[in-house]
Each structure stands twice: as structure tokens, then as C-alpha cells.
Amino acid sequence: MGWFRASDCVESGIACPVFPYFEPTVTACLLVEPKAALHARFAAFALACVLGLGGSAAIAAEKYELLGQPAPDLVARGLTGQNVRLSEHRGEVVVVSFWSGACNTCRAQLEALDRIAKTYGSAGLTVIGVNLDDNSLRAEKFARAQDVDFQLLVATAKSTGRDFRVDRLPMIVFVDRSGVLRVAHREFRSRDEALYVRELRTLLDE
């Protein structure tokens, strides 16, 4: 059950559920200090208030259990055959975007992340896109069609989705300079781009 069958995803612009045993959540996002879980909960609520998200967003964010923990290592292959390892980017703020070739919403999110990467790359931001589509030909076709400058990785271990608790697509996580998972977002809407920028600037300034 650790591998997303993109054939189950309807190309409707609606986020696609991946693992049915996870409770569906529309959005999950928070910025936490890498401390104890209790401190993380307080930080989640505080950030939601600052960003105007309200208590409900903070509660939803808590359902992503990996926040405040070291990010699982990730190794994936790019279109040209090179391997990329998440841990090699320690010291940078890393955005990991999970996508599939059957997800229309993923296209818009990748375009937004490309704009952000071009603006903040010189400040230490790295963006990588990771395919969770089990159809390798479709994934490669999708990746080649995207006009983005960051790496789109098309082949990764079947356990990657499970390791990162990916329960729908698109989904992104933000990893701080110490390798700790600090933010998670499910789904994407155009207004989310400004939120991403605010959260990433906070991490880049740490």
C-alpha cells in the first residue's frame, strides 16, 4: 500500500487521495520549532494565528505526524539518470513536492514553486519534485513537459510515499537547514503561493 496508483487519480484539478487509511484532510500546514511535540503544538497554533489561518488549520496540521522530526532520507533518479539524495542538501531549506503524471493540480503547484525557487534560490532554497506515479512512461512524459528549472525526479523507492506519509497529491513538505520537517501542505490553490513564500522566508531567515 506504500505506492500510489496514479490510475486511481481523476484528472479534475482536485487533489487525489493516495492512501485510504489516512483520514482525509483538506489542508495541513504549520511551522514548528524542532523541539518536543508539546512545543510543536503550541508553535503550530501560534503560527496559524499569525498567518490568519485560525485554530482549525493548526489542528489539521497536527495530523501530519512527522512535523518537528528529522526528514526521512530520500533517494530518487532524475530524467538524465542522476541520483539525488535529500540529505545531501543539509544546510539548505528544501521543498519536496510530491506529484504524479495524472495530477492536473500538480502542474500549477510546480509552476508556483518554480517562481519561488528563482526568487529565493540564492538565499539557500532548493526545490525538488518527486514522482509517486507507478507509470514510469507517463511520469517521464509529464516531467519533460514541465517548464521548471528545478529537478523533477521520476524514479524513487516504492516506500517513499509511505515514509513521508503522503496521503494525497499534490503534497509538499518544507525541510529546514538542519534536516527537520517543518511544514506540510496538502492540495494546492493559487492563493497558497503567497503562504509558501511567507513560511519559506521564515525558514530561510533562521
Image: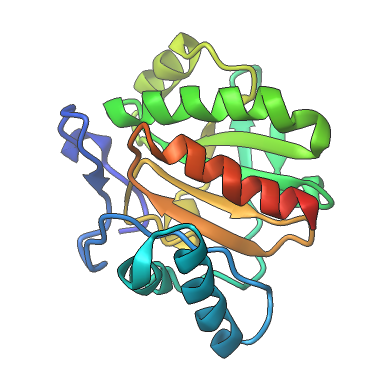
Left or right? Give the position of 116 relative to 20.
Answer: right
| Residue 124 vertical placement versus 80 (above, below) | below
- Label total for image: 0
Q: Residue 139's spot in the image, x, y percent?
A: 40, 24
Q: Please name the residue shown 53% across and 52% down the image.
A: 173
| Rendered residue at 64%/47% (across/down) | 200
42 to 125, vertically: above or below: below
Q: Is residue 19 left or right of residue 202?
A: left
Occupied quadrant, residue 183: bottom right
Is residue 5 in sight in this rendering? yes
**Percent position (x, y) of residue 89?**
78, 45
Left or right position of 193 against 70: left
Q: Where is 106 relative to 68, above or below?
A: above
Q: In this figure, which colouring scheme has been used for the structure?
A: rainbow
Q: Examine the image and state in which quarter residue 63 appears.
A: bottom left
Residue 108, placed above or below residue 75: above
Q: Quadrant of the C terminus?
A: bottom right
At horizontal 53% and vertical 66% (from top left) the residue drawn is: 47
